[in-house]
Image (cartoon, rainbow, N blue to C red):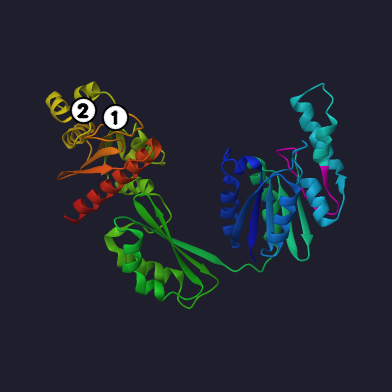
């Protein structure tokens, strides 16, 4: 049994909103051992909806459709599915009473417009998925052995209906093959070098266990997926990959590099401090976004102005005058200064030209110095990213955390 998701809305195609609904639905269906095999986004046009339903029904057992259930003229989904299933729309009395109750709460004393009554229209003979938290109900329709589910696009309403209405129904279907996932977070090896290092293990995988490479700035995530039972379990192969990759493994579970740093530093009573210029607090934000960060993070300084670098971090005036704020010498003094200030075990410092302005012939936009100060030494690296501002900052953060992790591994091995 497999599923397909169709999201309806020009706002998704125009990039005005991000389709977070599909990601959440995929996660929930994975927990049900129902793989989502395709996600399609389409415009609010009848012909597109009809074609998407036709194509999805040829591929999937369960088709989840979100969006387009509103009362306005631009929401054509209900009329379109009436055409697709050759069944009329009928007004559900219980849903209408619910809509009227909600309207009276937000507009007491006013008469509800006729257009709002249309929100109580559902497909004849469908299973109504009653929406306690909104006005648009969901609908479940079966046709030729396929299950179609139509849900509002508002995220909190969609989540409520799937959690409280749909999942209890799907759990009774049966027939799902068990799906298991295992993850490995690696650092220090590019995708091609990583693949070469584990090629023999990957080639020995049985047909029902697949390995996916998921590269991201600064790291590569490996995901093992097992569908159904196997003579050799997914855990056996997971352990072999972890052992082969050795110190390149940051974590053998599905977490971010920031989560791994917080978890590891907290368990080993290590402290981290940051001194940031071009990243503007992004390093500190990435760490403090993780629950439990207070156990390993005490201090983050955003030292945009040279006066702050001097007065708070102890960067020498002579260093700034001779080498400039964006220099190896400056980030070294920033890192060592904030480490001393916070009495930390490790510190990261960044200084660069994020852009789009501020570049020079000697230091063009994208020039970034990063320093990581550890227990025994301070290491630096120069980067020339030359992307737009947001990407330059993102790449700086990713490389800074990677340098920190490598420093930690080096210190631990000594």
The part of the image, by quadrant, that contains residue 303 is top left
Answer few, some or many: residues within 10 Å of disc 1's Cα (few below 14, many 20 plus, some between 14 and 19).
many
Q: Could you tell me residue 355's position as x and y percent?
A: 34, 33
- In the image, 278 versus 30, the foreground residue is 278
Taking the spot 26% from the left edge, 40% from the top edge, the residue there is: 271
Distance of label 1 from label 2 (alpha carbons): 9 Å
**Would residue 334 be found to the left or right of residue 137 on screen?**
left
**Would residue 212 be found to the left or right of residue 339 on screen?**
right
Secondary element at image label 1: strand
The residue wearing badge 1 is 301
Q: Which residues make up the magenta segment?
A: 121-135
- The mark total stands at 2
Secondary element at image label 2: loop
In magenta stretch: residue 278: no
Indicate the quadrant containing the C terminus: top left, top right, bottom left or bottom right: bottom left
Answer few, some or many: residues within 10 Å of disc 2's Cα (few below 14, many 20 plus, some between 14 and 19).
many
The residue wearing badge 2 is 313
Taking the spot 78% from the left edge, 60% from the top edge, the residue there is: 142
**Would residue 285 be found to the left or right of residue 49 on screen?**
left
Q: Could you tell me residue 21's position as x and y percent?
A: 60, 46
On the question of residue 209 being in view, the answer is yes
Taking the spot 35% from the left edge, 53% from the top edge, the residue there is: 219
């Amino acid at each position: 049994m497999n599923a397909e998701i169709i999201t309806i809305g020009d706002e998704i195609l125009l990039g005005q909103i991000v389709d977070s609904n599909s990601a959440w639905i995929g996660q929930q269906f994975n927990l049900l051992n129902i793989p989502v095999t395709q996600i399609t986004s389409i415009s609010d046009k009848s012909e597109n909806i009809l074609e998407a339903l036709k194509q999805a029904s040829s591929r999937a057992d369960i088709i989840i459709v979100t969006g387009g259930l509103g009362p306005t003229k631009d929401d054509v989904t209900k009329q379109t599915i009436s055409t697709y299933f050759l069944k009329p729309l009928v007004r559900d009395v219980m849903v209408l009473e619910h809509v009227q109750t909600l309207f009276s709460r937000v507009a007491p004393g006013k008469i509800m417009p006729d257009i709002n009554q249309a929100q109580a229209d559902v497909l004849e003979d469908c299973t109504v998925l009653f929406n306690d938290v909104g006005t648009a109900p969901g609908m479940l329709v079966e046709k030729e052995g396929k299950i179609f589910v139509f849900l509002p696009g508002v995220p909190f309403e969609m989540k409520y209906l799937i959690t409280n209405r749909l999942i209890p129904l799907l759990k009774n279907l049966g027939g799902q093959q068990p799906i298991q996932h295992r993850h490995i977070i690696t650092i220090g090896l590019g995708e091609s070098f990583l693949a070469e290092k584990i090629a023999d293990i990957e080639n020995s995988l049985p047909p029902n266990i697949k390995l996916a490479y998921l590269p991201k700035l600064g790291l590569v995530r490996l995901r093992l997926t097992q569908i159904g039972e196997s003579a050799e379990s997914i855990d056996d192969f997971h352990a072999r990959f972890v052992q082969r990759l050795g110190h390149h493994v940051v974590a053998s579970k599905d977490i971010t590099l920031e989560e791994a740093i917080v978890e590891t530093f907290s368990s080993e009573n290590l402290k981290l401090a940051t001194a940031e210029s071009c990243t503007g607090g992004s390093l500190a934000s990435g760490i403090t976004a993780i629950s439990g960060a207070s156990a390993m993070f005490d201090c983050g300084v955003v030292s945009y102005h040279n006066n702050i670098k001097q007065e708070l971090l102890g960067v020498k005036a002579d260093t700034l005058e001779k080498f400039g704020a964006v220099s190896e010498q400056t980030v070294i003094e920033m890192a060592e200064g904030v480490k001393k200030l916070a009495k930390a075990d490790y510190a990261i410092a960044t200084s660069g030209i994020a852009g789009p302005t501020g570049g020079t012939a000697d230091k063009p936009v994208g020039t970034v110095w990063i320093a990581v100060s550890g227990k025994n030494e301070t290491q630096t690296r120069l980067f020339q990213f030359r992307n737009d501002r947001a990407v330059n900052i993102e790449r700086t953060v990713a490389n800074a955390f990677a340098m920190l992790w490598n420093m930690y591994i080096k210190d631990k091995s000594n």
